[in-house]
Image (spheres, rainbow, N blue to C red):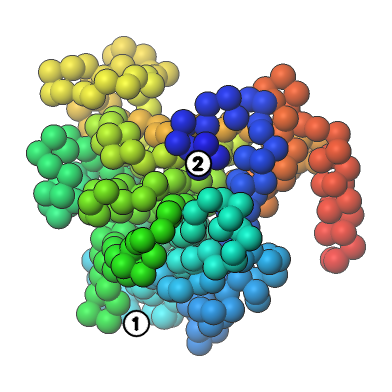
Amino acid sequence: MEYQGINNWEGLLDPLDDILRSEILKYGRFVEAAYQSFDFDPSSPTYATSKFHKNSILTRSCIGETGYKPIKHLRATCGIQLPGWVDRGPSWVSTRSSWIGYVAVCQDKEEIARLGRRDVVIAFRGTATCLEWLENLRATLTCLPDDVVNVVGPENGGAMVESGFLSLYTSGSDTCPSLQHMVREEIGRVLQTYGDEPLSFTITGHSLGAALATLAAYDINSTFSDPPMVTVISFGGPRVGNQNFRCQLEKSGTKILRIVNSDDLITKVPGFVIDNDDTEMTNNQALNVVGLPRWVRKRVEDAPLVYADVGQELRLSSKECPYLCKEGVVSCHELSTYLHLVNGFVSSNCPFRATAMRVLYKHHRQKLGSY
């Protein structure tokens, strides 16, 4: 359970514990499977859906044996209201609902014995469709919906999250229920099926998927009474909410490990970040906005753009990796970059191990040979 974050990964991050490294890479492969399964081709009749049947997502994604069985496809729906003329354009432009990830349950007896529990994974891919990109740009903070507030209680007041992420999580249509509804329904089914044995929920995602993983974890802990331990392993995630949202996450017992590349711009947006203080803000307290002149602070504090980082952070850097140091800005955000960095990171005093450098060099040669 320490590797699941029960003690907030104290003593495991710097230097990076080898078992924790393997666990992070395992969950990263689940996200990789979400990308491999998604149909990115706008000309395809199955665009924005999963290319694979639910039962074959992990096997056909070529991520190796996992011992987990996918049990549910997940979809996200854009809540932006578009003008009517958009529907007359290419269908890929106005695609509202798209396949975003899946739920998988550990079925391997040896893996269950190793973990000491049955693990349930929810994996989310990053941004892929036009409307998802538009939702990402809705950077202002908005209050959590009433159903979540009512579940958590009146002390939830002041918790806000990014408008676009919340829209993708809570929006539905006549033909597709919301991602929130699908997550709650499937978690309820899992608890009913396996509730008499030790369970854990591990929610993982990259980029937009990391933000949705954070919202889903908060929603699960807020909706279900006395749920199993809920952990988020996120890769290259943007900021999600304000300081009161972070406080509510901590009160709910949600454990979050953010894998951050210092050279990845996505981890520095949206909005501005406040000082990393654990106290909950009230209306009478002034926010200490990091990195801004005093004359700018007042306007920033009045705008719904002041965010707070959540959970524990494993900070890496592309510049410290011999294989990645000359790559461009875009590659700094790629999931493969994050997995390479996790594989090679040792500690803040020894950023990259030589053995990993050789592995990555070999991978690089193979990659070049495939072109």
Query: Could you tell me if residue 252 is visible in this image?
Result: yes
Question: Which residue has dot 2 on it?
Answer: 1
Q: Residue at x 72, y 30 (%)?
A: 346
In the image, what residue type sits under mark 2? Met
The image position of residue 322, as x and y in percent, is 81, 35
Q: Residue at x 38, y 21 (%)?
A: 276
* Quadrant position of residue 298: top left
Marks 1 and 2: which is nearer the front?
A: 2
Left or right, residue 8 beside residue 28: left
Question: Which residue has dot 1 on it?
Answer: 88
Above or below 79: residue 362: above
Badge 1 density bin: few <14, some 14–19, many ≥20, Cα 10 Å: few
Left or right, residue 108 beside residue 209: right
Left or right, residue 191 beside residue 336: left
Q: Which sits in the foreground, 20 or 308?
A: 20
Q: Is mark 1 on a helix, strand or loop?
A: helix
